[in-house]
Amino acid sequence: MYDNLIADYGDVTIKAPEHFVSDASNYLQKQLDAHKQILLLLSGGSSITQAVAVRNKLNVPPGKLIAGLIDERYGPRNHADSNWQQLYQSGWDNVNLEELRVEPKERATLTEAAAIYEKTLKKTIATVDICVGFFGIGADGHTAGMLPSSPAVSSTNYVVGYDAGEFQRITITPAVMSHFSRAFIYSVSQSKHAAITNFLQNGSIEEVPARALKLAKNVTLYTDYKKGD
């Protein structure tokens, strides 16, 4: 149904969701085959299944792929709501990978854990050849752990920790977005179409944090959304 759904919205290319895994894995494998060192930042939620499927298609030489999180739900090590824990439960393979982990609650406070992750992230971005992100867009227009009008959307830090209500979140901010060579966005279901419409329009990042994704050098949105939905 969506094989021909390829449309350009300024700096955002829209494609059908079934192309996410093949496009992302082909791009990453091409960079790995060219001996590039990659920082791959992953999201939680509905994109976890896609991330695991991409990983399963990759032939990763040792030391060439560093995986980290775009946002994490702060808490004790391996707690049930942790995005890393959910990745592993979904079949994530860490063979030959280096992983960037958020310090758990028993080792650092929320503020300390965010500061440590920021320092690690900055150092890693400065040393790798390319930075790639897998993102989602929520029905409220959020991406990563950047909720509308939250401290994360207005911060100039790379990483922010804050109390988001249901979870305490540690997340990257818009300050990181320009470092992404590629941003692969996976967002499907009718409930998110209004948010995608708002994302594609110009306007405030504080109102629709997903608009920050347009700061990446190359952005592709994989969705069942069609213009006019």
Image (cartoon, helix red, strand yellow):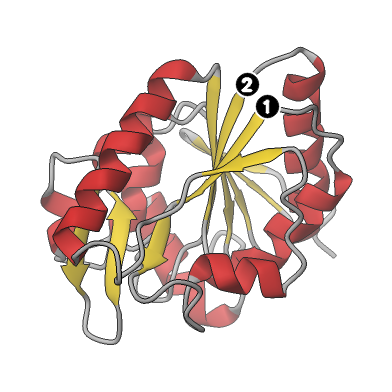
The reply to whether callout 2 and callout 1 are in contact (CB within 8 Å) is yes
The residue at which mark 2 appears reads as 37
Q: Helix or strand or loop: what does disc 2 sit on? A: loop
The residue at which mark 1 appears reads as 63
Which residue appears at 51% of the width and 82% of the height? 191
- The single residue placed furthest to the front in the displayed view is 107
Which residue appears at 33% of the width and 70% of the height? 74
Is 52 or 211 nearer to us in this picture?
Answer: 52
First in sequence: mark 2 vs mark 1: 2
Is 143 or 60 nearer to us in this picture?
Answer: 60
Q: Position of residue 44 (x, y in %)?
A: 53, 66
Instruction: Using residue 174 as the reference point, say whether residue 45 is left or right of it.
Output: right
Task: Locate the C terminus by quadrant.
Answer: bottom right
Q: Disc 2 vs disc 1: which is toward the camera?
A: 1
Within 10 angstroms of label 1, few (less than 14), some, or many (20 or more) residues?
few
Report, in whole angstroms, how far the alpha carbon at label 2 lies from the one at label 1.
8 Å
Q: Amino acid at mark 1?
A: Gly
Instruction: Using residue 86 as the reference point, say whether residue 200 is left or right of it.
Output: left
Q: Which mark is residue 23?
A: none
Q: Position of residue 28 (x, y in %)?
A: 73, 32
